[in-house]
């Protein structure tokens, strides 16, 4: 299992974003041989929707990024094309607790030169699927997304810590 880079201020993966979820992403392979992205996270009180439950918008953001990251599987810190959401459909199946170590798994389903489709799920500790998403994504360089030639602040592989 290879860890993917994170950034400084991304709401989903940013290590310096005090309100962020600080999701850690890893490249792995499913039992059937499919390349997957594994996300690990634990929501805090600032990610709450209903009392004791994680906000659906935050969960959607995590699934969005989990699928988007499938396009740079194996790229390490040198990402040339980024997955940009064109369409995302989310289905909420079970409530998701706060302050509990959770995971998400995502995979690419189809791709061509300009686009790809993917799916992902948030899993509860017992393995039950709490949230599902499917989406269509564009493949774009960072300059086309940000409108400038700039590096992503803090984009690197951070060591795992015990704080999660």
Image (cartoon, rainbow, N blue to C red):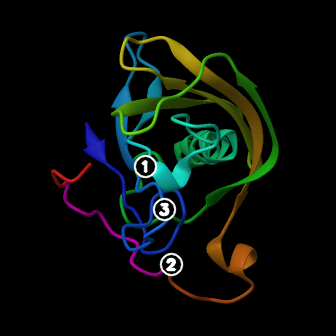
Q: Secondary structure at mark 2?
A: loop
Which region of the structure is painted magenta? Answer: 153-160
Which image quadrant is residue 39 in? Answer: top left
> What is the secondary structure assignment of the residue under circle 3?
loop
Percent position (x, y) of residue 145? 72, 73
Residue reaching furthest left?
Answer: 162
- Looking at the image, the residue that sits furthest to the right is 87
Answer left or right for 107 relative to 92. left
Q: Is residue 65 above or below residue 31?
A: below
Is residue 89 shown left or right of residue 161? right
- The residues bearing labels 1 and 3 have C-alpha atoms spaced at a distance of 9 Å
Residue 101 placement (x, y as % from top left): 33, 34
What residue is rendered at 61% in x and 47% in y? 58
Residue 163: x and y in percent read 21, 53
**Numbered label attached to residue 152:** 2
Determine if residue 36 is in view. no
In the rendered image of this protein, does residue 60 appear above or below residue 121? Answer: below
**Residue sitting at 37 percent across and 11 percent down?**
126
| Nearer-the-camera pick, 96 or 111 | 96
| Residue at the spot of label 1 | 44
What residue does disc 3 label?
20
- All told, the count of numbered labels is 3
Q: Nearer the viewer, mark 3 or mark 2?
A: 3
Q: Secondary structure at mark 1?
A: loop
């Amino acid at each position: 299992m290879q860890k993917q880079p994170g950034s400084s201020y991304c709401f989903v993966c940013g290590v310096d974003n005090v309100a962020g979820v600080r999701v850690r992403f890893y490249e792995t392979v499913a039992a059937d041989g499919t390349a997957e992205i594994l996300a690990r996270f634990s929501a805090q009180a600032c990610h709450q929707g209903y009392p004791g439950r994680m906000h659906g918008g935050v969960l959607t953001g995590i699934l969005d990024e989990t699928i988007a990251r499938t396009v740079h599987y194996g790229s390490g810190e040198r990402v040339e094309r980024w997955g940009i959401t064109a369409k995302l459909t989310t289905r909420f199946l079970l409530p998701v607790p706060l302050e509990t170590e959770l995971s998400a798994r995502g995979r690419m389903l189809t791709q061509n030169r300009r686009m790809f489709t993917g799916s992902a799920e948030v899993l509860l500790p017992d393995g039950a699927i709490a949230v599902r998403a499917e989406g269509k994504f564009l493949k774009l360089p960072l300059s086309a997304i940000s409108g400038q030639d700039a590096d992503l602040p803090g984009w690197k592989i951070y060591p795992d810590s015990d704080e999660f």
